[in-house]
Image: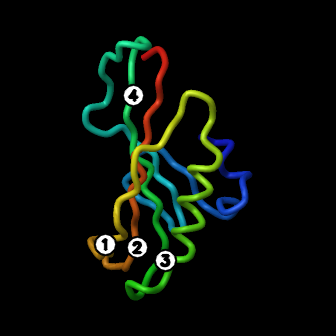
Amino acid sequence: MENLQTKDGLTNVNIHGMRSQVVAPALVVRPTEPWFEPDRFCKAVLRYVAVATVNAPSGEDGIDRLYTMVNAVIDNLSDGWDWESVGGPVIDESTGTSFLAVPVKLTFKGEA
């Protein structure tokens, strides 16, 4: 996933695994439920979520930036990776700062 930082739409985005603090704009990639399970065509299907975040004082702010980030992730997935869906944007104010976040559900098919 590190190669995503060089792609159009993600050049100024912080890309992380699971973290306690995130500086937006950011893309946080983490395992999701179920994390991995058998597949009849390969050894395993691994499931991840890539959460795109931007600073957002209101719901309208940041939508274009999120759209660009999400499309950059989808357009630049490496072999074995695929996307399942993109959730709707939500405003997260749990840290005292407003962030707009969108989850992108990803799968990786290969050996676990």
Q: Residues within 10 Å of mark 1 (few under 14, many from 20)?
A: some
Q: Residue at x 34, y 66 (%)?
A: 88
Mark 3 or mark 2: which is in front?
3
Answer with mark 3 or mark 1, whichever residue precedes in sequence: 3
User: What's under tag 2, amino acid-wise?
Assistant: Leu
Q: Amino acid at mark 3?
A: Ile
Q: Are marks 1 and 2 in contact (CB under 8 Å)?
A: yes
**Number of other residues with Cα within 10 Å of mark 3, as a class: few under 14, some 14 to 19, many 20 or more:** some
- Quickly name the residue at label 3: 63
CB atoms at circles 3 and 2 under 8 Å apart? Answer: yes
User: In the rendered image of this protein, does residue 110 appear above or below residue 2?
Assistant: above
Question: Label 4 sits on what residue type?
Answer: Leu
In percent of the image, x 42 and y 52: which residue is there?
Answer: 104
Q: Looking at the rendering, in which quadrant would you find the N terminus?
A: top right
Per the image, the residue denoted by label 2 is 100
**Distance Cα–Cα, label 3 vs label 4:** 28 Å
Residue sitting nearer the eye, 50 or 75:
75
Q: Determine the CA span between mark 4 and mark 2.
A: 26 Å
Query: Is label 1 in contact with label 4 (beta carbons under 8 Å)?
Result: no
Q: Which mark is residue 41?
A: none
Task: Please give the name of the residue rendered at 32% of the width and 71% of the height, measured from the top-left corner.
Answer: 90
* Distance in Å between CA atoms under marks 3 and 2: 8 Å
Residue topped by disc 4: 46
Circle 4 — which element? Answer: strand
Is mark 4 in CB contact (under 8 Å) with mark 2? no
User: Which circle marks residue 92 in the picture?
Assistant: 1
- Precedes in sequence: disc 1 or disc 2: 1
In three-dimensional space, the C-alpha distance between marks 1 and 4, rounded to whole angstroms, equals 27 Å
